[in-house]
Amino acid sequence: MTRRGMLKAAATLSGASLLTAAAEAFAKVPCTDGYATVPGGKIYWRKFGAGPKTPLLTLHGGPGSSHNYLLPLQALADERPIIFYDQLGCGRADAPNEDGIYTIQRSVDEVDAVRAALNLDRVIMLGHSWGALLAVEYLCQGRGSGVDRLILSGAMASIPQVMAGFNRLFATMPNGWGEKMHGLEKAGKTGTPEYAELVQQFYDKFVLRVPPPPEVVATLEALSKSPAYRVLNGPNEFTIVGRIKDWDRRQDLRAITQKTLITTGEFDEITLDCHETLRDGIAGQAHLAVMTGCSHLTMNEKPPQYNALLRDFMNA
């Protein structure tokens, strides 16, 4: 059972009326959108605002998600352009049914293609979750020209470190959760309601601690259709056997010289040590902010507080 299956049932409770309300709210901010050619096909992009300050380019999570859950950041468009895009295989982008096309390297190359298509010579780059992995990889490959500052949220420098953190979180779950979970996995019963309920308990604690808001509903709908999650990640959140499973840049973080803001939630599924590794390894000045009461989707749990952190950092 994938995380998209776990959260999607709860997401439907938000209803179409909430999605309509969110669309109306976003419509109040000047917005342009379109498609850009990248390696493998075309991606969909949206730009909010047209202020004079350096644009913020966002890289969404997943892999296989969409930009929608990051839309609370459009509140920052009063000062600068905020750019979102759906990566290949995600949301409104093309989704080729060719497993070989979904790789870390192609996704990194895609960032350059998006920047070129939108004339983003100078940007502040934000990556969340899988998007943070892309941002770290992008900069470790020496592609940071014009990236003035960096924001990493729910972030990591190593998938093996992430998995070690998952195992520690499993041990904190009550009522023999881990034993039940592994027992069902060994028995091949990951498609059962019992397994789904156990995984939902984990997500309610470490992924999203509020009812799914409209932007998350839209993202989960996109995630349910994306081929990228299976190829890059694996069958579920706890079994990372896809192409990212061995990714590890802990020894290369000195290549990142940008001033960096690292944010996480108190209960983030990406554990605190992963964020501390980034803070301590990046060569540029790095600040780590922990949002109390939040988990992985901090921008959806406490949007005003999250945006305030970003605004202060970008304007400092």
Image (cartoon, grey):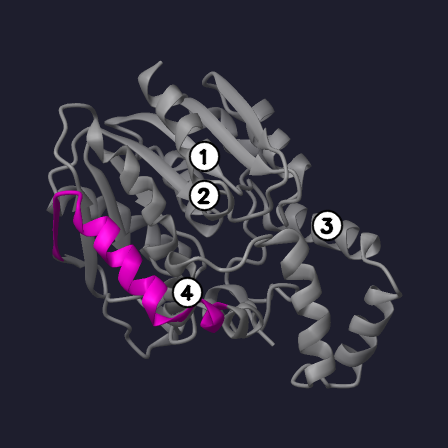
Q: Earlier in the sequence, mark 3 or mark 4?
A: 3
Compared to residue 235, the image places residue 140 above or below, namely: above
- The magenta stretch spans residue 15: yes
Q: Position of residue 117 (x, y in %)?
A: 12, 47
Q: Earlier in the sequence, mark 4 or mark 1?
A: 4
| Secondary element type, mark 3 | helix
Which amino acid type corresponds to the residue marked 4 in the rendered image?
Val
| Secondary element type, mark 2 | helix
Q: Earlier in the sequence, mark 2 or mark 3?
A: 3
Range shown magenta: 11-34
**Numbered badge on residue 217:** 4
Q: Residues within 10 Å of mark 3 (few under 14, many from 20)?
A: few
Can you identify the residue that label 1 sits on?
306
Quarter of the figure that contains the C terminus: top left
Q: Is residue 92 left or right of residue 306?
A: left
Can you identify the residue that label 2 sits on?
299
Which amino acid type corresponds to the residue marked 1 in the rendered image?
Tyr
Q: Nearer the viewer, residue 47 or 133?
A: 47
Compared to residue 60, the image places residue 280 above or below, namely: above
Can you identify the residue that label 3 sits on?
164
Q: Nearer the viewer, residue 18 or 257?
A: 18
Q: Residues within 10 Å of mark 2 (few under 14, many from 20)?
A: many
Which amino acid type corresponds to the residue marked 2 in the rendered image?
Met
| Secondary element type, mark 1 | helix
Disc nearest the viewer among 1 and 3: 1
